[in-house]
Amino acid sequence: MSNLTLLCRNATTFTKSEGLDEEAFREFLQRFVDARLGVYLASGGSGEGHALSRDELRRVYKIGVEVCKGKVPVNANPPEQHTAQATIEHAKLAVEAGVEVVNVYGPASLHGYRPTDAEFTGYFDEVLGAIKHPVAIAPNPVIGYTPRPALIAGICDRFSQVVAVNLSGLDDTYFIDLKDLIKRDVGIYVPLPGSLHTLALGATGLLNPEANIIPKTFRRYLDLYESGDFDALGRVYADLQRFNRHVGKWHSGSPRWLKMTMKVLKLPGGEGGVRLPYLMPEDDEAESFTDGLLRLRLPEIDELAGAAGLHLPA
């Protein structure tokens, strides 16, 4: 059994009429249980958390707990909010539903706002003063700024309920500085790019949205890393990076490529598409995307394509 953990920011499945597709969501989550991958529910990006009502958020968290808890880690990834109070209110929804860990971003960079160090730490003081449940914090540049490692380490050291830091879009130097500065045992999760370095430097595991599509390949990557089969590991890492490069064109709006791939490969909920403000790509774009996807010849993609009745290129 692997000691490394992989957590996926999960897509949320909708019906064709844009309602929450609970049956498909259960089927979709079961894939992660089968692959031994943990989940982060209702993310602001891949999970379209900003487009979910409070009742829908409550259902997403409840269903995730029902399907996953006790089998794989089941966490919540609420979208960034502009105020501490809004963050607290959303986090409590997830806590009440029974999730294990709630991820907390810094205050949203709305209208160009970038918090001062005092504002950033004050925000977390208020949020973590109210939320005593296990928490992960995320200095993610996608929210519009990158807090210094010392600020994140200070929050980890002041609040014992902080059990993890989720990194994305940050280099090895940030990881090293953060790990050196934190004075107690806090898990650090990293994205796939560069993870051959950061896992060796002591990362706890991986966190990404790409495992929505190829969870078994990501599970194999971590298993190979722990077994020390570095020849096979290198090949799988290269496959994963090729997949990332292909879908990277749509990374500014991950629900687009996720839902397009789910539809192409006939994964649970794939027919439901996205919610506004996102729009599904046009047919010609989807056709080009599919051709490139199948030409990757990743074993798990080939398996999914075969099950979907797609013709694989020679």
Image (spheres, rainbow, N blue to C red):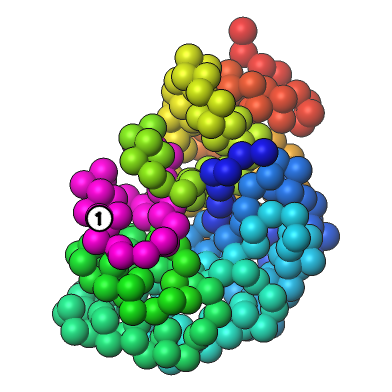
Q: Is 111 left or right of 280, judged from the image as shown?
A: left
Whether residue 286 is visible to the viewer of this picture, yes or no, is yes
Residue 8 location in percent, x, y?
Answer: 56, 51
**Residue at 39% from the left image edge and 79% from the top image edge:** 159
**Residue at 62% from the left image edge and 53% from the top image edge:** 38
In front of the other: 81 or 249: 81
**Which residue position holds label 1?**
180
Residue 143 location in percent, x, y?
Answer: 32, 66
In front of the other: 309 or 214: 214
Element marked by disc 1: helix
Whether residue 174 is visible to the viewer of this picture, yes or no, is no
* Mark 1 neighbour density, 10 Å: few (under 14) some (14–19) many (20 or more): few
Residue 310 location in percent, x, y?
Answer: 72, 24
Q: Is residue 251 above or below residue 303?
A: below
Residue 81 position by quadrant? bottom left
Q: Is residue 221 above or below residue 6?
A: above
Residue 308 location in percent, x, y?
Answer: 76, 31
Q: Is 121 left or right of 184, judged from the image as shown?
A: left
Q: Is 302 left or right of 34, judged from the image as shown?
A: left
Give the extent of the magenta segment: 167-195
